[in-house]
Image (cartoon, rainbow, N blue to C red):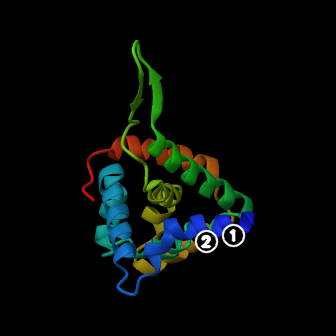
Amino acid sequence: YEAFWCFVQFMSTARHNFRRDEVGIRRQLNKIANIFRIGDLGLYSHFEKMQAEDCFFVYRMVVVLLRRELTFEQTISLWEVIWAEKKDVTLGDIKPSRSSWKMKKKQKSTDDLILFVIVAAVRQRRKVIIAKCNGLDEILRECNSMAGHLDVWSLLDEARELFSIVNGRIND
């Protein structure tokens, strides 16, 4: 039953990734490009020089929510953090006041936290990408080589830092 509910939650998060028109994937890739543009202009400029500013090199990461880049245990931890954060944002914080309980909305939702985590993963290879990658194929190869070499907790830390830098500066 736990596997079933994990699958249900995964599909509610990723269902837009499986549309034939790929509108969900394109929206996410555009948002990733904007996160790079605002959060790491130097790396984004390098992508532009290589005509890779569409960020197609992270396509696989977006479709399967980093499942191939992280170990099974790390993937479960990441997805659990993302799902818990979504629930937390929808519930808000209950703060007591003198006369009644009021719901206080937290800062802007991190519905796209996974996109910030993907950007953080690529940024961990920033030096190599800038120094050695001269085309889309090389960036793709570098991104694929990340599999099994990432730390989910450092990715989440960096993703939250990026979110605070980019927060409110990207149009959906």
Q: Which mark is residue 145?
A: 2
Task: Tell which of 91 and 81 is nearer to you.
Answer: 91
Residue 63, horizontal then vertical, whole percent: 50, 74
Left or right, residue 114 beside residue 151:
left
Helix, strand, or loop for circle 2? loop
Depth check: give the residue in front, 36 or 77. Answer: 77
| Residue 145 visible in the snapshot | yes
Label 2 neighbourhood size at 10 Å, few (<14), some (14-19), many (20+)? Answer: few
Q: What residue sits 46% from the left and 80% below the top?
A: 18
Q: Residue at label 1?
A: 4
Label 1, label 2: how many angstroms apart (C-alpha)? 31 Å
Quarter of the image for residue 112 reads bottom left
Instruction: Tell me where residue 57 appears, x and y as whole percent.
Output: 45, 74
Q: Is residue 69 above or below residue 36?
A: below
Q: Going 55% across and 53% down the picture, which residue do you hit?
A: 82
Label 1: how many Cα within 10 Å (few below 14, some 14–19, many 20+): few
The tag on residue 83 is: none
